[in-house]
Image (spheres, helix red, strand yellow):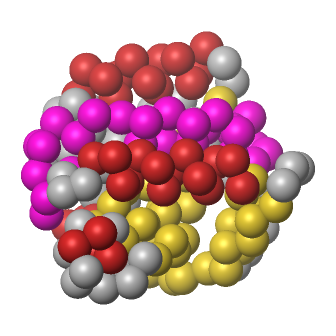
Amino acid sequence: MWAVPYHSPVRNGPSPILAGMLTITQSLHDQIVAHARADHPDEACGVVAGPVGSGRPERFIPMLNAARSPTFYEFDSQDLLKLYREMDDRDEEPVIVYHSHTATEAYPSRTDISYANEPGAHYVLVSTADADGAGEFQFRSFRILEGEVTEEEVRIVEAY
C-alpha cells in the first residue's frame, strides 16, 4: 500500500513517551475532528508533528486520502515523502497519526495495525459514524507496536 515506508529512516527508535496517555490541546482535538467530519463520507487522515523526543503534538498536518474511500485511507507517497523531509528539516517527528472510520467504531482494523510503522506515535481514530446516524461519535487513541494494540487515555487540555 505504501510507496514510501511509513517511518523515517533517520530516526533512532521511539520517542520517550508518557505511557498510557495522549495529552492533546483542545485546538488540535477540534482540528482533527473537523477534518474527519469535512471529509466524511470518505476517511480523513493526517499527522500531528511535534519536536523530536518531546512526545508533544503541536503542528496539525491534514493529508489527502489518496484512496478517496469511505473504508480505507492511504497517504499519497509523494506527499508523505515531502512531509518527512519537512519534519526532518524542522526537527520534528509524527507524534500523532490519525484517520477516521466512517461507519464503524474508532478501533484499529487489521489493515490499520499492519501499516502502523511509527512505534513512538499515538494512533488516533475518530468515528464519524454518527454523521449517518449509524453510531456515536468517538475520539480514541492507541499505541500499536509489533501488531499489539493498546488503548490509552486521552486528556484534552487548553494549552501545554
Please say if 140 is above or below 120: below
Between 97 and 7, the residue placed more toward the observer is 97
In this view, the residue in front, 60 or 129, is 129
Residue 14 visible at all: no
In-front residue for pair 62/34: 34
- Say whether residue 40 is visible: yes
Residue 157 located left or right of residue 142: right
- Residue found 25% across the figure and 20% down from its top: 78
Q: Is residue 49 positioned above or below 120 on the image?
A: above
Residue at figure coordinates x 33%, y 61% from the top left: 100
Residue at the (50%, 33%) spot, across then down = 61
Could you tell me residue 51's position as x and y percent? Answer: 74, 35
Question: Quadrant of residue 108 in the image?
Answer: bottom left
Q: Position of residue 47 (x, y in %)?
A: 48, 42
Q: Percent x, y for residue 102? A: 24, 67
Identify the magenta region. Answer: 46-73
Q: Residue at x 62, y 79 (%)?
A: 152
Q: Is residue 12 left or right of residue 115?
A: right
